[in-house]
């Protein structure tokens, strides 16, 4: 009985604690008073926590502008990612299994192209399109559905919609796009939520694209802003950690929304169920 | 039809730039001017004589050789450990996934702190068990270990895949096995792992690619190649050449090499797997 | 919005931490107020690495910024490619600026071919010694003054070391070690104009300086050891009051000005026994991208930035030593309300300033050398072997890439 | 309701269809009369669903034509053919209520709201599901779902209904009731219905005519009883009827017939102490209203091949006998059987065709 | 083979089991004799699988005991009980060949290689799958898989076999054949077998005794024919038999019986021009060897509740009649029926119990 308890709860809890530890240290680190030398012994909680670091951040950089920019980018990119990923996933779902396997391999090959290979050459494209220093280049990853993982997630979820339903809808006169929107998508709402969340974390953290394709400082996103903090006074660990906390917190909050589905006891069922409710 | 937008995006945003990039590999393009001249295999000759490239290659291969198995072990181990439904199970899983949502830069900054020799929690933890700790980022080996350690945390995607794949396995099989006298360990060895094999192979391939190429930002921010080029992984080296030392064409060539290496490693993996006959 | 193409706007790319960027922003606002017909897009990045990434992508993509700030140790690779619109003719034709207004040392550093000026250097920093006056008093050692020697320096450093404190904070890198080499009459490279290899071991004078520098850590242990330095940078240590002397350029001043608990000031570098005073130039310059349609507006921006007004604004931020001598000699720089009191030290260094080579491959050489020097300095490799390997390893990097 | 020639006549002309290397249909000719309820039956994979999909236009034939009311519909997209299909799994949209399921087609075809509501309600009332309109599919029983699927087909007011194994996922009791409902609906509407099943018992009970398919070919078409009584070949004989017909190569105990295969249905073998065939009861299944005896006879044949085969198998010919319950027979008993001579079927052993 | 008391006797004592709020079993008492083939039957969700799982030890009962050969096995883990189970979906290991599937348990129990091979081969040969040993499960048909699953159970040489709807996913032909195999196997081995089905026809054909379950309770236990002939209550009467028994509340056309429900099976209603019940044929199903008539009689009852109900429904009592084929009846015909008076079942309308 005891060993069962250990196997079922204590060991998992230890691992969970291990993985939660970095976040904990981040949060705790940000609560230390600014300018105090760091402790030389393990400190689970700072002796006198303060939010001084957070109040200083807006003085050092246009924090709220950066955050607003990030929010804007995310607000544009997440829906786009969801649309592209779901369209592609649906397309994948409709393919015969052999073609599907080929496309999946194609997705892996796409992964094979190193990011460094496309940064500069993409710039040329964006210049030709006249969109440098707008948010459009930041939407490019969204056009690519964030990552093949998200496409596969959708393909997986749509796999739960039987062929016969799609055919029934066709017989009733629905076009494919209407089938996608009215039959398929509503049945995978949990998957949509999950993809949206993953897309959120992806776009929120995107650092390279804004660095390369944005010129105007007042369009910068927060991920870039975080870089400026790194150069600051190196005793300001609390400040840096506060910056990290602000960078991480939205992702964590949004993720907590999705974990109900993604990390469900039965993620596949959770992804596919939920036509309603 | 539904694949069209994505297909167009892939062609425009990946295939075309990548092709251009490949073209540049045989020029003297610096990235600063716009009149690259064809120089044939000169870059290749340079590459063959480049000691730093060899260092970089070694660093990358070491990283892949250690990091991929460890990440896989962590993702699979935790995935299987936490797959069974239990009260609060979702929260355990959430904890494991959370490091994955930390933005790359923040993760690296955080690990600068975690690996700090005197103030960092890691050495302090080691101190609790009486170990003096390491100057993590100062020694070539420990710096590599540090990067690997950092990248052991964001394993969420693989973790989820394993969770889902495990849940897809038929519970009946386990009951059948139990009736035939198979204990939990035997079930793991004789059922779970063989049945998950296709998924695991997919994960290995994906992780290999990712580890070789994409986990660039955190490594870049954490060590930027130091110390003594021990963590000058190929993407970092490419980045330095292409963007810092005006060696755009040279960087492009190394990019090709990187792709080739990835392809070779993956092919080798798939061949091995075929020999084991886990995929029919 | 046709800012990148049109005639009415220019893009300026700068690097710096949050506070520096704030200073530049003030200056840009002043420029826009004075020149309403030019619209400036300020595009700051944090580190020089990011600056390079940004510049390369935009150059490669065909839309480089009109003006960008570049360190002289990195501009070589741009100049070698003809990517920079040389500033000489603009300066010659300028009514607002005169070549004689600026420190010749700074200007010389930006003459790529040795004659014509490539970029307009905005500052003229040098390596100096920041010291904690209270610690000196407590240890009973005299504060450093011009002409002090390596021996004075070492004695002082030893006196300051102990009790969890260290005498000196310095990072092992080419720009830090170079002034000592030069002071001792040595050279870093075989030929400063067309270098082909490092000469750390070959010349006795150089070798002696290198050894002296390494000994600070390896023998005398007056510099924080590896783990300490990794945990807390020298700057942080100095701020906290546990470091006696800290070697850096002017760039540290804005941060040091946050010190409230003790007095601090600045002193020149010590001189080698029998040697001459020497220091190293730190300078960033405004460069114009070649082939842009709008050089006129770009130059107008540079004129403003280099003029008394622009230089004054930046001088006030504390971050720079103005390259414009009249501003540098003005009270705005010399007699500020904030420390360091002995600002004259920066100007006194001007005649002894030297620059590292400005070739297309120098930044790479410097970077790899720094990485290996760090190994030596912290005793991770054996000295003799390490130095020899260092030279060998770096040697191929001097070669120009195939053309 | 309809005037003139009733619509809904379907003609399939040498229809072929392959999926990759699998030949699903191989030259199918078939004529479905307007207003007829016809049943396609055949083992799994015999191409039944494929025929429906081709009629509906969900797939295109590789060769051959589909004519509806005399017109080739090859180029007509599915939703323009006046055809409704009910799928085996009903294919109800799980995220929509019953009402919205019924309205879906009307909405996408932009039927005015009031009119659409009226039609949906009419269909729901006709199938007695008007009180379920606000439920979701997973809140209903199998039979109710079945009726919703039918109602959805009804809303289209098609000239042809295609029913792909509509009863397969119902359990026995419900199946029986729904079968009755379907029959009643057809009797009332008199619209052409093509019904697919792989269950031979169902094939016998539903439909004016039954089409027996095997590996993409039509084996026999005719009224169920006729097909049962006079199977066109060995396949049909073995497929229809449960337990299947006893087939003896070479005639054997059923009377010598070299080159032929003789067959007799289990119900056409009577227990008769005077009967010509002596058998041993091996097992017995009691079904309440009847019993099945599994017996084995000694092979007495002059066909050398058959004899050899029987000898090789080390056993005599197996004969299944259907008889009434409560007859007091136990396994191991020896009995004598008498086949009904009028009901012995004769097939060519080579071709399998009836002779 | 075995000496002394044959093992495999099972006793369930007031076994209860709930899953969350669902009560799967509610006080089940049952005794299975050693060597018996007993069939559990009941509608979906009645707790059949749960009983097997409790016997196998895959789940623990909330209350009650499971005794095997007189010993409480409550604390014995599944693999220590000498019990083999065949699952409805076979639960073959998809990554292993048939051979390795058969060897799996032997390997786990570290049976020496040669011995293990011998046993696996013996089991394979007995079920005639020796030529399939190198195939993977997905390369076989349903019937073949079924036999592999049985062979795997056989390899264990257990004292009890548990079979959970082993035939459910087979089609009719295969089902018939496999049923026969199963029976033959039991007759040969004489090992205790507990067989589960929800198909009442199957329940009637397999097994020495049948246990009818409903909502977690045992409704009746007995030999199939006995249960069919004398159902213990209305549920059993309605559940066994297809088409089900005609039940008339209050007796009605079957003869007045206030407070009782009278039932008669379709085969016990004979067509008889002199018969007392006049009916109209509404529909007809021809099954080849027999026909089912769906008829409606005018309700003539003195039980006011029943009359009211009939009137409210706007229709008379429906009666199903089973008769021979080829009788020339058409829908709409009027017929007269005669129930077999000896075969009229009487149930208490209140409790549903037989009277
Ligand atoms: N989309 C498809 N891709 C490949 N093969 C197919 C496809 N659809 C059907 N087939 C094959 O075509 C043949 C006929 O299939 P069809 O679905 O018509 O059979 P069926 O008679 O309806 O069988 P069932 O009773 O199992 O539904 C089968 O061998 C099947 O495997
Ligand atoms: N693991 C479980 N969790 C929750 N409820 C369960 C579980 N297993 C069974 N049940 C419930 O217990 C009841 C009995 O289930 P059981 O599987 O024994 O039925 P069954 O008679 O085998 O039905 P079927 O014929 O459909 O297999 C059902 O209502 C079922 O929903
Ligand atoms: Mg079908
Ligand atoms: Mg069950």
Image (cartoon, coloured by chain):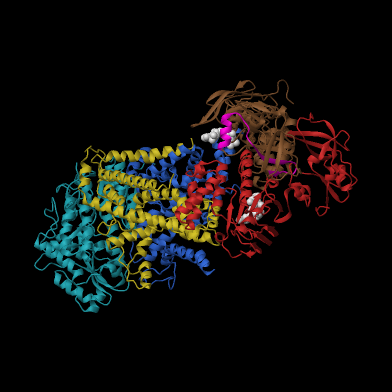
Chain colours: A blue, B yellow, C cyan, D brown, E red
- Image coords of residue D28 (percent x, y): 58, 25
**Closest to the observer, D220 or D115:** D220
- Image coords of residue B178 (percent x, y): 53, 57
- Image coords of residue D168 (percent x, y): 65, 40
Can I make out residue E56 in this image?
yes
- Image coords of residue D326 (percent x, y): 76, 44
Which of the image's four quarters has the N terminus of chain E? bottom right
Can I make out residue A196 in this image?
no
Q: Residue furthest right?
A: E302
**Closest to the observer, D337 or C39:** D337
**Closest to the observer, D119 or C256:** D119
D297 lies left or right of C159:
right
B149 lies left or right of C270:
right
Q: Residue at x 62, y 54 (%)?
A: E191
D294 lies left or right of B123:
right
Q: Which image quadrant shows ligand 1? A: top right
**Closest to the observer, A212 or D13:** D13
| Numbered marks: total | 0
As for residue D27 lying within the magenta part, the answer is no
Residue D263 vertical position relative to residue C159 in the rendered view, above or below: above
Q: Kindly indicate the quadrant of the structure image that contains residue D317.
A: top right
Residue C142 vertical position relative to residue E79 in the rendered view, above or below: below
Residue D29 vertical position relative to residue E210 in the rendered view, above or below: above
Residue B59 vertical position relative to residue C288 in the rendered view, above or below: below
Q: Kindly indicate the quadrant of the structure image that contains residue B134.
A: bottom left
Q: Which residues are magenta?
A: D284-312
């Amino acid at each position: 009985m005891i060993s069962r308890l250990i196997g079922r709860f204590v060991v998992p809890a230890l691992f969970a604690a291990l993985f939660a530890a970095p976040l904990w240290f981040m949060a705790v680190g940000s609560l230390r008073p600014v300018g105090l030398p760091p402790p030389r012994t393990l400190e689970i909680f700072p002796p006198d926590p303060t939010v001084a670091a957070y109040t200083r951040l807006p003085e050092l950089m246009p924090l709220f502008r950066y955050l607003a920019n990030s929010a804007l980018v995310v607000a544009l990119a997440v829906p786009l990612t969801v649309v592209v990923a779901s369209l592609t996933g649906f397309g994948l779902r409709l393919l015969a299994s052999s073609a599907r396997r080929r496309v999946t391999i194609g997705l892996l090959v796409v992964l094979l192209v190193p990011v460094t290979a496309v940064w500069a050459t993409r710039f040329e494209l964006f210049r030709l399109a006249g969109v440098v220093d707008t948010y459009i280049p930041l939407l490019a990853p969204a056009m690519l559905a964030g990552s093949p993982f998200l496409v596969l997630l959708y393909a997986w979820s749509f796999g739960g919609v039987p062929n016969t339903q799609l055919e029934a809808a066709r017989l009733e006169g629905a076009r494919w796009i209407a089938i996608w929107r009215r039959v398929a998508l509503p049945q995978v709402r949990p998957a949509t939520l999950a993809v949206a969340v993953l897309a959120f974390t992806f776009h929120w953290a995107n650092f390279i694209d804004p660095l390369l394709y944005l010129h105007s400082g007042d369009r910068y996103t927060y991920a870039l802003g975080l870089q400026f903090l790194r150069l600051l006074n190196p005793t300001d660990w609390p400040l840096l950690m506060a910056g990290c906390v602000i960078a991480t917190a939205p992702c964590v909050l949004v993720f907590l929304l999705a974990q109900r589905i993604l990390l469900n006891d039965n993620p596949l069922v959770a992804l596919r169920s939920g036509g309603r409710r | 039809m539904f694949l069209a937008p994505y297909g167009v995006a892939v062609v425009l945003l990946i295939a075309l730039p990548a092709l251009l990039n490949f073209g540049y590999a045989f020029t003297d393009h610096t990235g600063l001017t716009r009149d690259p001249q064809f120089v044939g295999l000169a870059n290749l000759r340079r590459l063959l004589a480049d000691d730093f490239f060899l260092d970089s290659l070694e660093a990358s291969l070491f990283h892949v050789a250690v990091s991929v198995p460890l990440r896989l072990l962590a993702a699979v181990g935790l995935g299987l450990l936490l797959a069974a439904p239990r009260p609060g199970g979702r929260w355990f899983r959430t904890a494991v996934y959370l490091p994955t949502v930390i933005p790359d830069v923040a993760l690296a900054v955080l690990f600068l702190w975690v690996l700090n020799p005197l103030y960092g929690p890691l050495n302090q933890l080691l101190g609790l068990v009486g170990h003096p700790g390491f100057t993590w980022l100062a020694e070539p080996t420990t710096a590599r270990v540090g990067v690997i350690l950092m990248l052991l945390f964001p394993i969420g995607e693989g973790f989820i895949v394993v969770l889902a794949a495990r849940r897809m396995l038929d519970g009946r099989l386990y009951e059948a096995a139990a009736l035939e006298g198979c204990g939990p360990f035997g079930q793991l060895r004789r059922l779970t792992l063989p049945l998950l094999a296709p998924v695991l192979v997919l994960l290995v391939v994906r992780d290999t690619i990712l580890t070789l190429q994409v986990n660039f930002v955190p490594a870049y921010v954490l060590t930027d190649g130091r110390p003594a080029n021990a963590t000058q992984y190929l993407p970092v080296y490419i980045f330095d050449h292409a963007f810092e030392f005006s060696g755009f064409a040279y960087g492009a060539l190394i990019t090709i090499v990187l792709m080739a290496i990835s392809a070779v490693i993956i092919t080798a993996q798939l061949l091995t797997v075929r020999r084991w006959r886990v995929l029919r | 919005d046709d800012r990148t193409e049109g005639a009415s706007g220019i893009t300026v790319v700068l690097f710096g931490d949050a506070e520096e960027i704030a200073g530049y922003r003030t200056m840009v606002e002043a420029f826009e107020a004075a020149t309403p017909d030019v619209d400036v897009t300020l595009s700051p990045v944090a580190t020089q690495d990011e600056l390079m990434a940004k510049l390369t992508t935009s150059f490669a993509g065909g839309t480089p910024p009109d003006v960008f700030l570049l360190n002289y140790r990195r501009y070589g690779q741009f100049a070698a490619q003809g990517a920079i619109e040389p500033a000489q003719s603009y300066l010659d034709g300028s009514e607002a600026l005169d070549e004689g207004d600026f420190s010749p040392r700074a200007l010389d550093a930006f003459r790529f071919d040795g004659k014509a000026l490539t970029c307009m250097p905005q500052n003229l920093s040098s390596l100096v010694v920041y010291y904690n006056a209270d610690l000196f008093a407590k240890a009973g050692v005299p504060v450093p003054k011009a002409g002090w020697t390596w021996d004075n320096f070492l004695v002082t450093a030893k006196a300051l070391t102990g009790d969890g404190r260290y005498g000196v904070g310095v990072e092992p890198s080419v720009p830090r070690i170079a002034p000592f080499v030069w002071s001792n009459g040595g050279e870093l490279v075989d030929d400063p104009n067309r270098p082909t290899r490092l000469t750390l071991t070959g010349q006795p004078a150089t070798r002696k300086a290198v050894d002296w520098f390494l000994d600070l850590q390896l023998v005398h242990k007056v510099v924080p050891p590896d783990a300490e330095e990794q945990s807390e940078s020298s700057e942080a240590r100095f701020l906290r009051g546990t470091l006696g002397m800290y070697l850096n350029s002017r760039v540290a001043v804005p941060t040091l000005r946050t010190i409230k608990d003790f007095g601090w000031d600045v002193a020149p570098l010590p001189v080698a026994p029998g040697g001459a005073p020497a220091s190293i130039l730190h300078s960033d310059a405004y460069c114009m991208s070649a082939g842009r349609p709008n050089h006129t507006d770009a130059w107008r921006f540079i004129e403003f930035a280099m003029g008394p007004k622009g230089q004054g604004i930046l001088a006030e931020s504390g971050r720079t030593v103005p390259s414009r001598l009249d501003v540098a000699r003005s009270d705005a720089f010399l007699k500020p309300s904030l420390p360091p009191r002995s600002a004259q030290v920066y100007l006194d260094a001007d005649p002894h300033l030297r620059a590292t080579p400005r070739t297309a491959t120098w930044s790479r050489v410097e970077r790899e050398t720094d990485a290996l020097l760090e190994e030596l300095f912290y005793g991770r490799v054996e000295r003799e072997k390490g130095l020899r390997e260092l030279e060998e390893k770096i040697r191929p990097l001097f070669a120009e890439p195939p053309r | 309701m309809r005037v003139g020639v009733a619509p809904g006549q379907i003609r399939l002309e040498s229809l072929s269809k392959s999926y990759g290397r699998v030949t699903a249909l191989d030259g199918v000719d078939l004529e479905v009369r307007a207003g007829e309820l016809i049943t396609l039956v055949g083992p799994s994979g015999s191409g039944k669903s494929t025929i429906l999909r081709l009629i509906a236009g969900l797939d295109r034939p590789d060769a051959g034509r589909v004519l509806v009311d005399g017109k080739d519909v090859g180029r007509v997209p599915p939703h323009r053919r006046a055809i409704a299909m009910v799928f085996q799994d009903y294919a109800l949209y799980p995220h929509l209520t019953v009402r919205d399921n019924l309205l879906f087609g009307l909405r996408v075809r932009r039927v005015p709201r009031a009119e659409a509501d009226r039609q949906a309600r009419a269909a729901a009332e006709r199938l007695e599901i008007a009180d379920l309109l606000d439920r979701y599919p997973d809140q209903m029983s199998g039979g109710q779902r079945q009726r919703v699927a039918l109602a959805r087909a009804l809303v289209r007011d098609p000239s042809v209904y295609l029913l792909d194994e509509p009863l397969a996922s119902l359990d026995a009791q419900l199946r029986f009731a729904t079968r009755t409902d379907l029959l009643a609906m057809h009797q009332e509407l008199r619209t052409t219905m093509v019904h697919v099943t792989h269950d031979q018992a169902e094939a016998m009970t539903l439909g004016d005519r039954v089409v027996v398919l095997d590996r993409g070919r039509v084996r026999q078409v005719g009224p169920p009883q006729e097909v049962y009584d006079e199977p066109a070949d060995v396949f049909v004989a073995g497929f229809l009827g449960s337990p299947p017909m006893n087939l003896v190569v070479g005639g054997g105990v059923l009377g010598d017939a070299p080159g032929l295969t003789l067959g007799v249905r289990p119900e056409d073998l009577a227990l008769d102490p005077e009967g010509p065939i002596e058998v041993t009861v091996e097992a017995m299944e009691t079904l309440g209203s009847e019993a099945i005896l599994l017996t084995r006879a000694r092979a007495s044949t002059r066909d050398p091949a058959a004899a050899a085969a029987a000898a090789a198998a080390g056993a005599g010919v197996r004969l299944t006998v259907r008889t009434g319950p409560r007859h007091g027979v136990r396994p191991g008993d020896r009995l004598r059987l008498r086949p009904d001579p009028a009901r012995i079927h004769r097939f060519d052993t080579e071709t399998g065709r009836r002779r």
